[in-house]
Image: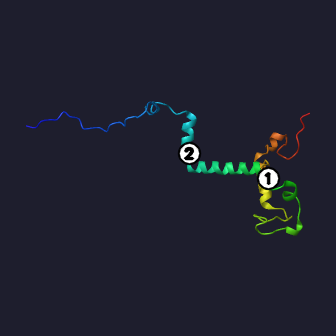
Amino acid sequence: MQTISTDRPSTAKARPFTTKKEFYAQFRKKSIAQELWLRFLKNKTAVMGLIIFCIIVAVAITAPWIANYETVVIKINIGERLQSPSMKHWFGTDELGRDILARIVHGAGRHHPGPGAQAHPRAQGELPDGHAHDHA
């Protein structure tokens, strides 16, 4: 006849805590903001987007120190028109000899709404045939 053992298999023991702080830390809940931040950090694409966004904001804030608006960005210099990228003009120059990098840097700090951001013509009081609508 076989004897049945009543001993239970050994279970993994919990790690003993060395301080009260470690013990109570297991019961502390994380805030919603902290949980969202940790979830955000797991998404590599979102983190990369945040890094790029921060770089654009930093460049926009420091634009006046990177290139002078009056002498580099809007000044026409026909002698340097359509130059390829070089140490003097990292992105080259445009048709009027203006530095392209300086224009991009200063453009990052200005908001220019594009066609998608404009109101619909009917919301501006224009009829489908293209004529203005009198509200008087």
The vertical placement of 66 against 122, above or below, is: below
Tag 1 near tag 2, CB within 8 Å:
no
* In the image: residue 84, left or right of residue 41: right
* In the image: residue 112, left or right of residue 36: right
**Which tag is nearer the camera, tag 1 or tag 2?**
1
At x 78% / y 55%, what residue is drawn? 66
Q: Which mark is residue 51?
A: none
At x 84% / y 57%, what residue is drawn? 73
Q: Residues within 10 Å of mark 1 (few under 14, many from 20)?
A: few
Q: Earlier in the sequence, mark 1 or mark 2?
A: 2
- Viewer-nearest residue: 109 or 66: 66
The vertical placement of 12 against 95, above or below, is: above
User: Residue 69: image x %, image y %?
Assistant: 85, 54
At x 81% / y 40%, what residue is drawn? 123
**Which image quadrant: the N terminus?**
top left
Secondary structure beneath dot 2 equals helix
Q: Which residue is mark 1?
A: 65
User: Residue 134: image x %, image y %?
Assistant: 90, 37
Q: Amino acid at mark 1?
A: Trp
* The residue positioned farthest toward the front in the image shown: 18
Q: Which residue is mark 2?
A: 41
